[in-house]
Image (cartoon, rainbow, N blue to C red):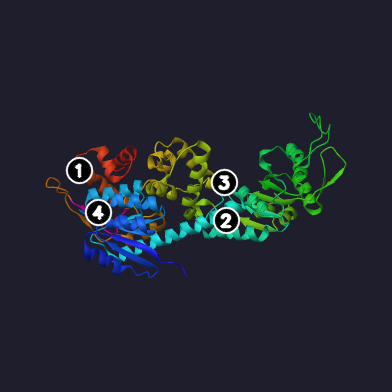
């Protein structure tokens, strides 16, 4: 039986501590209550804290310091900050999420139903991270492939298919858009098969002319054509005993299709310009971003070749249909490019991750990988921030509206449910009399405009201070000021 995980509730208000404790309805957790910072740090030093609920700032507790220590002891600890409803506290909580690693914040008085909803999200995320790490260890040991990862239902289906078909000799057709990882899937199949110690030989069929493709596939004899001063082995011979990966096989012409069909049927061929028949033991894995079934119907592709290639079919899902895998991929790519470029990027802010989650990634995993590589190389700080994002991602249609309330990217659907009705933000001092009204049902644009406008008033139009309070870069603030006409 697994040990119960520990939730540490720190607050100098005894009644609040007890109410939160009573409201948590998960029997799998052991709850510890402390009343000051010293007791909280002592618990963190001596226990493995899985979830920390701590105020942003009280007389007895500096929540930022406590959460930083907790993160040092356990990087996967879930952090829920409790705050007042002031603009300054809201901004500080957002900053804590972006820079210190807090996961959520809840305004006081605590809505206990809202607390349980947020707590469930933290628990689910911790489970996801744990499963990912276990899965990544398996993939690293089994495949040694960076970027071929994910914990989505779609990717689990891919893994299951690979595990099932890898030991066989069956021809496989991998379908998917460009950048979805078709070659990585092919390599994973090869490395999981009995042929793992033999060559894996890829060839990109669409990148070669018709005559050159034939020579590359089957080889040629000396004098077969102008410039053929020596005999050359083709990819089929080079892959003997191993796996030949035919990328973009949907682009080969009819003549080459006929020759491919013969090799699939007999495992025999002749080099270009030669008469000797060669026999090879090769497993063929093909891939395409075309709809070959439709191409067959239009007479653009041989139906017999299509059926020989597609004995088993694997569909690689586009990244936009498995966005829950983006944080896992980002983590893998940061690690990869840290090593390649001798960088020490330690993570990415929640706000920046939300931009990545909302972007549609038409170039799929390859586009995400290129994006993270550029961010890692150009980053000015150890944590990737919004200002490190490429302009086209910041300004994409799906990113024009930014979540002001720092919800976790996996629970965007829960936004309206988790908001408390019409919270009122009181004035910060005697000179600032405006109040901020946020109602369930308001659009995110309206909420964002209201928060920015009132924060500008509070700072006497000090852009740098406003950006700091809101936890965003100055460039981002100026774009939003222009967007909402707040100049």
Q: Residues within 10 Å of mark 1 (few under 14, many from 20)?
A: some
Mark 4 in CB contact with mark 3 (< 8 angstroms): no
Q: Nearer the viewer, mark 4 or mark 3?
A: 4
At a point 26% along the width and 53% down the height, the residue shown is 56
For this rendering, which residue is in front, 334 or 72?
72
Mark 2 in CB contact with mark 1 (< 8 angstroms): no
> What is the magenta range?
435-443
Q: Residues within 10 Å of mark 2 (few under 14, many from 20)?
A: few
Q: Distance of mark 1 from mark 3, alpha carbons?
A: 46 Å
At a point 26% along the width and 41% down the height, the residue shown is 466
Residue 437 located within the stretch drawn in magenta:
yes
Left or right of residue 153: residue 283: right
Q: Earlier in the sequence, mark 4 or mark 3?
A: 4
The residue labelled by disc 2 is 138
Indicate which disc residue 457 carries. 1
Q: Position of residue 291 (x, y in %)?
A: 63, 52
Q: Position of residue 310 (x, y in %)?
A: 69, 56
Q: Earlier in the sequence, mark 2 or mark 4?
A: 4
Q: Distance of mark 2 from mark 4, alpha carbons?
A: 41 Å
Against 1, residue 416 (above or below) is above
Q: Earlier in the sequence, mark 4 or mark 1?
A: 4
Q: Is disc 3 placed on a helix, strand or loop? A: loop
The residue labelled by disc 4 is 61
């Amino acid at each position: 039986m697994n040990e119960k995980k520990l939730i540490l509730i720190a607050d100098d208000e005894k009644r609040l501590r007890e109410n939160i404790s009573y409201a948590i309805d998960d029997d799998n957790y052991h709850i510890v209550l402390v009343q000051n910072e010293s007791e909280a740090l002592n618990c963190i030093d001596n226990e493995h804290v899985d979830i920390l609920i701590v105020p942003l700032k009280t007389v007895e507790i500096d929540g930022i310091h406590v959460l930083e220590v907790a993160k040092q002891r356990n990087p996967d600890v879930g952090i829920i900050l409790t705050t007042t409803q002031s603009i300054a506290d809201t901004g500080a909580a957002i900053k804590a999420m972006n820079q210190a690693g807090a996961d959520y914040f809840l305004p006081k008085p605590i809505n206990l139903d809202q607390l349980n909803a947020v707590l469930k999200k933290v628990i689910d995320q911790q489970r996801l991270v744990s499963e990912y790490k276990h899965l990544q260890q398996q993939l690293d040991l089994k495949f040694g492939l960076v970027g071929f990862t994910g914990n989505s239902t779609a990717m689990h289906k891919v893994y299951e298919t690979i595990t099932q078909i890898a030991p066989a000799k069956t021809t496989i057709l991998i379908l998917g858009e460009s950048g979805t990882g078709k070659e990585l899937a092919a390599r994973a199949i090869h490395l999981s098969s009995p042929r793992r110690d033999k060559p894996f030989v890829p060839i990109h069929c669409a990148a070669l002319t018709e005559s050159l493709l034939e020579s590359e596939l089957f080889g040629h004899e000396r004098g077969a054509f102008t410039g053929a001063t020596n005999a050359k082995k083709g990819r089929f011979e080079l892959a003997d005993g191993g796996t030949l990966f035919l990328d973009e096989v949907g682009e080969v012409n009819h003549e080459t299709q006929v020759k491919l069909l013969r090799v699939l049927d007999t495992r025999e061929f002749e080099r270009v310009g030669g008469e000797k028949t060669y026999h090879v033991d090769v497993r063929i894995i093909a891939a395409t971003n075309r709809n070959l079934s439709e191409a067959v119907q239009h007479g653009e592709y041989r139906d017999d070749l299509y059926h020989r290639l597609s004995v088993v079919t694997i569909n690689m899902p586009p990244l936009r249909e498995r966005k829950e895998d983006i944080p896992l991929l980002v983590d893998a790519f940061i690690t990869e490019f840290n090593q390649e470029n001798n960088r020490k990027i330690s993570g990415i802010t929640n706000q920046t991750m939300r931009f990545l989650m909302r972007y549609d990634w038409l170039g799929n995993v390859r586009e995400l990988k290129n994006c993270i590589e550029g961010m890692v190389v150009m980053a000015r700080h150890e944590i990737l921030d919004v200002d490190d994002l490429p302009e086209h991602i910041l300004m994409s249609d799906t990113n024009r509206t930014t979540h002001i309330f720092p919800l976790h990217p996996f629970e965007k659907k829960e936004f309206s449910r988790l908001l408390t009705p019409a919270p009122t933000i009181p004035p910060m001092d005697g000179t600032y009399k405006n109040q901020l009204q946020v109602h369930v049902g308001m659009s995110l644009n309206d909420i964002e405009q209201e928060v920015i406008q009132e924060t500008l008033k509070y700072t006497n139009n000090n852009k740098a201070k406003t950006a700091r309070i809101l936890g965003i870069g100055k460039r981002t603030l100026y774009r939003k000021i222009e967007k909402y006409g707040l100049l």
